[in-house]
């Protein structure tokens, strides 16, 4: 779920910025759409090396790659945490940074395989390709589980920000044909996941500006309907012009009682993705009878150090350990 700390992006105001991966975003405080990044320094790359690097899970794009980190104790059937990076659907890369190490260490020590995945970004192809890609990655993992020593029956989707939206889409759209593109391989293999961890992901793009305004956020946080917003670029047209597409990109649209357990975590001061976005998903899941927890992290915005504390890492571990194969 990570944005490569070594990749630089040039914004339209000719400022170069390096944004860390989703867990790194949690430590740095997130990436605003029009922020001042002058004092923000990217974290160092993690020293961890995947056992299998840049594995192609599909062949439609060179972007469609994943890495496999295997648990410390060798096993023939390690449960999987699929990590989906953030970056507004526009930026990002799967490489880990040092800020990811605490959670990744906890997962690997507890017998989990960690599989960060890349997907096509909005500049390459708009919605629904990102969803189709992460679904294809799940199918690839499940179809090739024996080759990598993975458990095909326990795959947990984990994402932050835009990655949180995609993780939640994996959780709720298990039977939605639109997102299982047979051309991406492993047709007929299930793309369902057994659990979802969504850190501060958006849900209903059409409500974000109004919710930010109601929350008392500043004008700069009420730009989601603009033509150059992350959400509009992702949909391929402005959010107001693409209300039908926005609902297709909304995990709430597909919620039903068959969905897996969800852990939603949200900064109590998040204005980049309004708090009500997570509340909407929580309420829809709860109404459908899906096990769901919504954890509000005090004094934290769109990411922050609160997400990487030992206490919160333990909450994540408690959630994943409770999921049955």
Image (cartoon, rainbow, N blue to C red):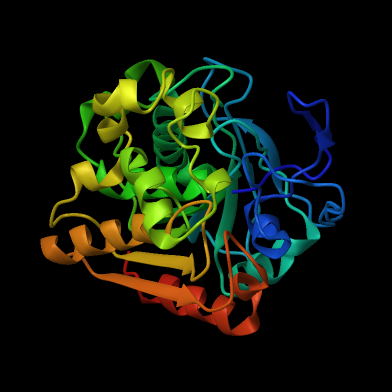
39 or 58, nearer to the observer? 39
Give the residue drawn at x 66%, y 48%.
31
Residue 254 in picture, x, y percent from top left: 20, 43
Image quadrant in which the C terminus is located: bottom left
308 or 299, nearer to the observer? 299
47 or 229, nearer to the observer? 229
Regarding residue 305, the answer to whether it shows in the image is: yes
Give the side of residue 220 with respect to residue 77, left or right: right
Residue 317 in picture, x, y percent from top left: 50, 76
Above or below: residue 61 compared with residue 51: above
Give the side of residue 30 with respect to residue 125, left or right: right
Give the residue drawn at x 70%, y 64%.
27
Residue 106 in picture, x, y percent from top left: 63, 73
Give the side of residue 286 with respect to residue 232, left or right: left
Residue 51 in picture, x, y percent from top left: 71, 49
160 or 183, nearer to the observer? 160
Regarding residue 152, the answer to whether it shows in the image is: no
Above or below: residue 18 compared with residue 180: below
Above or below: residue 302 compared with residue 292: above
Give the residue drawn at x 19%, y 50%.
255
Give the residue drawn at x 42%, y 48%.
202
So how many labels did they put on this image?
0
Give the side of residue 11 with respect to residue 236, left or right: right
Farthest-out residue, bottom: 311
Name the image quarter holding residue 143: top left
């Amino acid at each position: 779920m990570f944005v490569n700390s070594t990749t630089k992006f040039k914004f339209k105001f000719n400022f170069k910025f390096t944004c860390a991966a989703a867990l790194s975003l949690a430590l740095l405080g997130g990436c605003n759409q029009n922020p001042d990044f002058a004092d923000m320094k990217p974290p160092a790359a993690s020293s961890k090396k995947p056992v299998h690097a840049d594995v192609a899970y599909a062949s439609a794009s060179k972007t469609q790659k994943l890495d496999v980190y295997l648990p410390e104790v060798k096993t023939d059937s390690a449960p999987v945490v699929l990590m989906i990076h953030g970056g507004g659907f526009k930026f990002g890369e799967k490489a880990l940074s040092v800020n990811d190490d605490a959670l990744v260490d906890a997962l690997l020590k507890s017998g989990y395989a960690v599989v960060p995945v890349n997907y096509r970004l909005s500049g390459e192809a708009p919605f629904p390709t990102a969803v189709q890609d992460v679904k294809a990655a799940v199918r690839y993992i499940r179809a090739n589980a024996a080759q990598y020593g993975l458990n095909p029956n326990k795959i947990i989707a984990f994402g932050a920000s835009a990655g949180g939206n995609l993780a939640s889409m994996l959780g709720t759209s298990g039977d939605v044909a639109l997102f299982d593109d047979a051309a991406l391989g492993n047709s007929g293999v299930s793309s369902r996941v057994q659990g979802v961890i969504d850190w501060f992901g958006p849900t209903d793009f059409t409500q974000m500006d109004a919710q930010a305004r109601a929350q008392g956020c500043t004008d700069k946080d009420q730009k989601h309907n603009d033509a150059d917003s992350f959400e509009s670029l992702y949909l391929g047209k402005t959010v107001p012009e693409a209300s039908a597409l926005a609902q297709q990109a909304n995990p709430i649209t597909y919620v039903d009682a068959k969905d897996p357990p969800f852990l939603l975590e949200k900064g109590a001061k998040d204005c980049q993705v309004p708090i009500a976005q997570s509340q909407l998903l929580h309420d829809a899941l709860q109404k459908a009878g899906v096990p769901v927890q919504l954890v509000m992290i005090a004094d934290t915005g769109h990411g922050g150090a609160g997400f990487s504390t030992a206490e919160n890492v333990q909450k994540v571990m408690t959630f994943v350990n409770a999921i049955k194969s």
